[in-house]
Amino acid sequence: MARIIRLPRRRRSIVLEGAVACGAAVACILILAPMAQTPAVAAGDPMAEATNVIAGSAGVVDGDGLRIGGERIRLHGVDAFERGQTCGDQPCGRLSAENLDRLTRSAEVRCTPLDVDRYGRTVARCTARGVDVGAAQVEAGLALAYRRYSLDYVPQETAARRARRGAWATDFTPPEDWRRAN
């Protein structure tokens, strides 16, 4: 037969607090454990980024699109001019794709996935030779900061506009508006 042990009131309180703390810890583990199974990419965390990186030689699809192996990649926070788009008398869409090709040619391109877009492309921040290629495209004036999705490249866009680089030297239709009209 089991015996019930009566503890002094103070000791009962300590045991009860311990039991509540253990229960809270178990609840936290049960809630947080599923999140640990889906690795999150923490900005600046090389260990988290290293496990999710898509790396290799990249083919350029357009000014904000790459292909590494079989993976279609859309540059995060960037909206580049479309291939057939002109800015004034400049073929800014073609120039944008050519610039992205120059940035990535003969280099290992490393892309950290952030999302998947509605077309099934991986949305990622990509670097080549240690340079953020999205930032370089915007700073060259050959893409715009895609403010609807990110404000990351607004400073580069401001610098390009002030220096009248790329499309900023002419009149142009923003890529999103151009796509809607064409």
Image: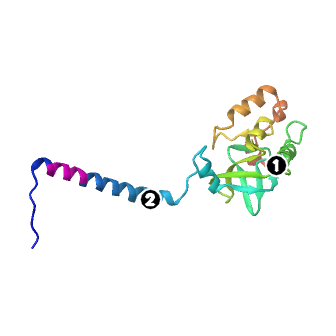
In the image, what residue occupies the spot 81% across and 32% down?
168
Residue 104 - label = 1
Residue 33 - label = 2
In the rendered image, which quarter is residue 121 located in? bottom right
Which amino acid does the dot numbered 1 rest on? Thr
Residue extending farthest to the bottom is: 1
As measured in the structure, the alpha-carbon distance from the residue carrying label 2 to the one carrying label 1 is 39 Å
In the image, taking residue 102 as reference, residue 65 lies left or right, namely: left
- 77 over 34 or under it: above or below: above
Which sits in the foreground, 111 or 117? 111
Residue extending farthest to the right is: 89
Which amino acid does the dot numbered 2 rest on? Ala
Mark 2 closeness class: few <14, some 14–19, many ≥20 residues within 10 Å: few
**Tag 1 secondary structure:** helix
- 48 over 131 or under it: above or below: below
Q: Position of residue 180 (x, y in %)?
A: 73, 48
Q: Position of residue 24 (x, y in %)?
A: 31, 53
The span shown in magenta is 11-18
Q: Is residue 25 highlighted in magenta? A: no
In the rendered image, which quarter is residue 66 located in? bottom right
